[in-house]
Image (cartoon, rainbow, N blue to C red):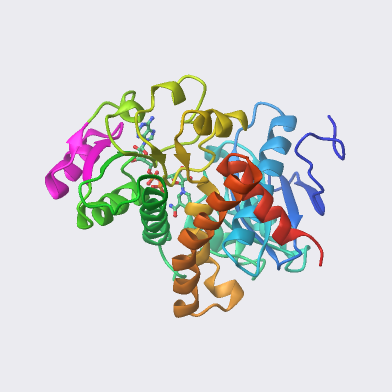
Amino acid sequence: MELFTHLDFDGHEQVVFSQNERDGLKSIIAIHSSRLGPALGGCRVWDYATEAEALTDVLRLSRGMSYKAALAGLPLGGGKSVILADRSEKTPEMMRAMGRAVERLGGRYIIAEDVGVEVADMDEVAKETRHVSGISGGVGDPSPWTAEGVFLSLQAAVKHRLGRGLDGIGVSVKGLGHVGSNLCGLLAGAGAKLVVSDIREEAVKAMAEAHGASPIGVDDAHAAEVDVFAPCALGAGLNEKTIPQINAKVVCGAANNQLAVAEDDDRLAARGILYAPDYLVNAGGLISVARPSTGLSDAEARTKLEAIPDTLTQVFALAETDGVAPGAAADRLARKTLEPV
Ligand code: NAD
């Protein structure tokens, strides 16, 4: 397995492999950059097929956090951690061992929840380190913040691409969970016409009842006859197969890692579809959870949330001047922010 020459290594500052056989911990903590502040990022518990797959995942996620924090204007670096285990193998002892691994980094990495990790797990971690976010009694659910950032971004993207407001605009929201359902409420309030889909029928029904949304099948959601496609389920929804079928002129949603591969950024641009980069528009949740560790007041956090659409407009302008797709332009802007002065 390659380390320093790994395709996703990308100048990572520090990668820590920790093992504690007694407590069943095998983890990797990746700190991509701490130039702007301590590296805040979630911990994923996942039964990876190979150790190489775990390393690739943590390196990619950690770099993504650096870029997200940089574009959100947060005094935070980017990091992430993975525990190589099935979530059924998780124990309080394992999480406490993870807490000690975090503590040994002396605050350079702040751990939080990600896939496979609950608030109760972070409460265990917190018994060993104070460099933890997302514990009981903390800042609460980040989803409404994420939804609002996506909503404001969607408004800015529609203005940029279609030169109009949201009243009467058709939006296909795929994924009606914590973020998607909040987003539907905001869109309906702004007069948008909703087309909704989820694998959970009850979620679709709830949106139809609350906002008069029209249901569509999950496999057809991206191809709906609407102005905007808002992916709010899982990643990799924008790919070689789906992009040619998209009828919307704007893609703007909360899901992480929407592009299956980097080339999908260009594929969307070539079809005249304006893509609002996922890690920029979904940063509202990070802004919310960053409040305790950064000391940001609620008002300061709100100002950062409301600045997301301005940064998005800046990214669209950069894409046009540099002749690149918006995803690449966002990466450029983030890397510039991370450059040593
Ligand atoms: P969630 O688990 O509450 O909701 C996801 C929804 O997607 C569920 O209702 C699920 O049934 C549905 N779904 C799953 N597979 C689907 C499919 N194939 N087709 C249609 N629907 C499907 O998650 P969430 O917190 O709302 O997050 C949604 C997305 O936004 C995720 O990709 C997440 O990583 C990203 N995100 C969330 C936040 C946040 O604050 N919660 C922040 C940043 C990014």
Residue drawn at the location 77% of the way across and 68% of the way down: 106
237 or 325: nearer the viewer: 325
Does any portion of residue 122 appear in the rendered image?
Answer: yes
Magenta residue check for 116: no
Residue drawn at the location 30% of the way across and 54% of the way down: 182
For this view, does 236 lie left or right of residue 294? left
> Residue 25 location in percent, x, y?
70, 45
Above or below for 257 versus 80: above
> Residue 36 location in percent, x, y?
71, 67
**Which quadrant is the C terminus positioned in?**
bottom right
**Which quadrant is the N terminus positioned in?**
top right
36 or 91: nearer the viewer: 36
For this view, does 50 lie left or right of residue 159? right
Residue drawn at the location 12% of the way across and 45% of the way down: 209
> Residue 186 location in percent, x, y?
27, 56
52 or 172: nearer the viewer: 172
Question: Could you tell me how many numbered marks the image carries?
Answer: 0
Ligand 1 found in image quarter: top left
Single out the residue that lies furthest toward the top: 241
> Residue 7 location in percent, x, y?
78, 34
Does any portion of residue 114 appear in the rendered image?
Answer: no
Above or below for 290 versus 202: below
Please identify the quarter of the rendering in which residue 215 is found.
Answer: top left
Residue drawn at the location 56% of the way across and 34% of the way down: 265
The range drawn in magenta is 193-215
For this view, does 185 lie left or right of residue 83? left
